[in-house]
């Protein structure tokens, strides 16, 4: 598992600053939410943590280790993308086991771990299903199972509920929270939805125009807004 520290992260594109001196500390095992409107910098910050982008300056630490320049594959981080990024030519089992196969895990380990992760997300018996046979909620659970199969220290969720209808979004939100609590995995959740952020997070950071507006526990942010 991993505690995370962002230290003075700055990022710009074409001379326009999108992240301005970001300081955040995420404790081990927390579900920490980046909340803000489109363009506020929250997804850029998530991608920097994942290693898909590099900051102009500043550093990121996990468990005290500076990972700022470490390649994504060496960061012990898994990410669930907004569009899930599942492989349409693979069935459910093949999608979930993909990371384990890349790491050349033994076949027995792959089978056991994949089945365990499918059971975690309530998809036991779905191994042979094609991805295009699944509902949006089921596809999202496959994406989460795939992310968990490699035993990451940190789980990143980039607006994972945005493609679901309101009823399914509410149910899935609580499923994610329950799973995260049971596993005790440090999780970063990105959303523009205040209800999602305030109802399922241990801590929330509110962002706008590349700046941190406020951070703290949901009740504190809601009841004592700084602006």
Image (cartoon, helix red, strand yellow):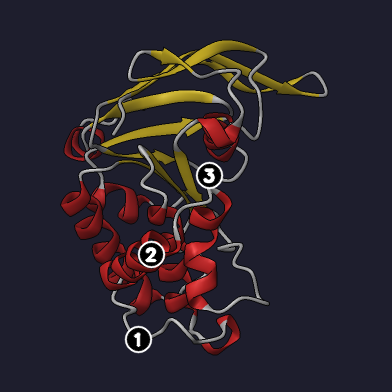
Nearest-to-viewer mark from 3 and 2 = 2
- Residue 168: x and y in percent read 36, 77
Determine which quarter of the picture holds residue 87. Answer: bottom right
Q: Residue at x 52, y 54 (%)?
A: 99
User: What crowding class fits label 3: few (fewer than 14 Cα within 10 Å), some (14-19), or many (20 or more)?
Assistant: some
CA distance separating discs 1 and 3: 38 Å
Q: Quarter holding the N terminus? A: top left
Q: Which residue is mark 3?
A: 37
Nearer to me, 4 or 24: 4
At mark 1, the secondary structure is loop
Sequence-wise first label, 3 or 2:
3
Determine which quarter of the picture holds residue 55. Answer: top right
Q: Residue at x 44, y 35 (%)?
A: 76
- Residue 148: x and y in percent read 38, 54
Labelled disc at residue 108: 2
Q: Is residue 175 above or below residue 206?
A: below
Contact between marks 1 and 3 (CB within 8 A): the answer is no
At mark 2, the secondary structure is helix
Q: Residue at x 58, y 34 (%)?
A: 72
Visible residue check, residue 41: no
CA distance separating discs 3 and 2: 44 Å
């Amino acid at each position: 598992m991993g505690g995370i520290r962002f230290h003075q992260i700055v990022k710009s594109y074409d001379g326009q600053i999108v992240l301005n001196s970001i300081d955040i500390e995420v404790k081990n095992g927390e579900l920490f939410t980046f909340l803000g409107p489109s363009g506020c910098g929250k997804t850029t910050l998530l991608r920097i943590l994942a290693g898909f982008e590099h900051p102009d300056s500043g550093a990121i630490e996990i468990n005290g280790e500076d990972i700022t320049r470490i390649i994504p594959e060496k960061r012990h981080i898994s990410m669930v993308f907004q569009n899930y990024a599942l492989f349409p030519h693979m069935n459910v089992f093949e999608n979930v086991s993909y990371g384990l196969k890349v790491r050349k895990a033994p076949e027995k380990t792959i089978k056991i771990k994949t089945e365990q992760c499918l059971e975690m997300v309530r998809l036991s018996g779905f191994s042979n299903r094609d991805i295009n046979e699944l509902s949006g909620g089921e596809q999202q659970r496959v994406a989460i199972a795939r992310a968990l199969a490699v035993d990451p220290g940190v789980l990143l969720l980039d607006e994972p509920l945005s493609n679901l209808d309101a009823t399914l979004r509410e149910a899935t939100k609580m499923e994610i929270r329950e799973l995260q609590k049971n596993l005790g995995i440090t999780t970063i959740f990105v959303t523009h939805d205040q209800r999602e952020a305030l109802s399922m997070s241990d801590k929330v950071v509110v962002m706008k125009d590349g700046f941190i507006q406020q951070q703290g526990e949901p009740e504190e942010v809601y009841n004592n807004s700084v602006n």
